[in-house]
Image (cartoon, rainbow, N blue to C red):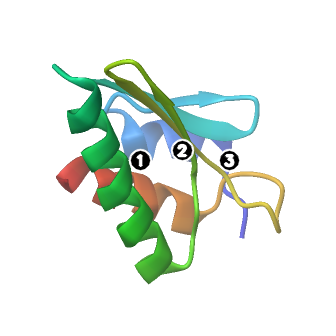
């Protein structure tokens, strides 16, 4: 089930995720390129376990994660749960 932008913002307000264009997005910075790649691998394993796969963009010492439901074409509770779990990494 899709959730409203207001509910998304309320659910993720303390975690620095942003709601933009029907997706929740967060950027992470690392000291080295390989630290970022390692983090992306952890996210990939988590996503596979939850069967909910974010878009991951790997840059030099940065990772951008965007999460939305491809099936529902928007943000669902499952998306917010994945974002919260990624924060715990």
Which secondary structure, mark 3? loop
Which secondary structure, mark 2? helix
Q: Is residue 83 left or right of residue 70?
A: left
How far separated are the C-alphas under marks 3 and 1?
11 Å
Question: Which residue appears at 37% of the width and 48% of the height?
Answer: 40
Q: Tell me the tag on residue 69.
A: none
Residue 13: image location, x then y, percent: 36, 33
* Residue under numbered circle 3: 4
Pointer 3 or 1: first along the chain: 3
**Dot 2, how many residues are within 10 Å of its Cα: few (below 14), some (14-19), or many (20+)?**
many
Q: Is residue 57 left or right of residue 41?
A: right
Residue 86: image location, x then y, percent: 32, 53
Establish if 45 lies above or below 33.
below
**Dot 1, how many residues are within 10 Å of its Cα: few (below 14), some (14-19), or many (20+)?**
some
Q: Which of the 4 image quadrants contains residue 60?
A: top left
* Residue under numbered circle 2: 8
Question: Which residue appears at 44% of the width and 40% of the height?
Answer: 10
């Amino acid at each position: 089930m899709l959730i409203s932008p207001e509910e998304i913002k309320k659910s993720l307000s303390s975690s620095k995720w942003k709601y933009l264009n029907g997706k929740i997005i967060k950027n992470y910075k690392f000291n080295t390129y390989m630290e970022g790649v390692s983090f992306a691998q952890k996210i990939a394993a988590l996503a596979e376990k939850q069967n909910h796969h974010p878009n991951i963009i790997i840059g030099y010492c940065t990772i951008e994660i965007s999460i939305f439901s491809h099936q529902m074409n928007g943000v669902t509770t499952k998306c917010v749960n994945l974002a919260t779990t990624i924060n715990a990494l």
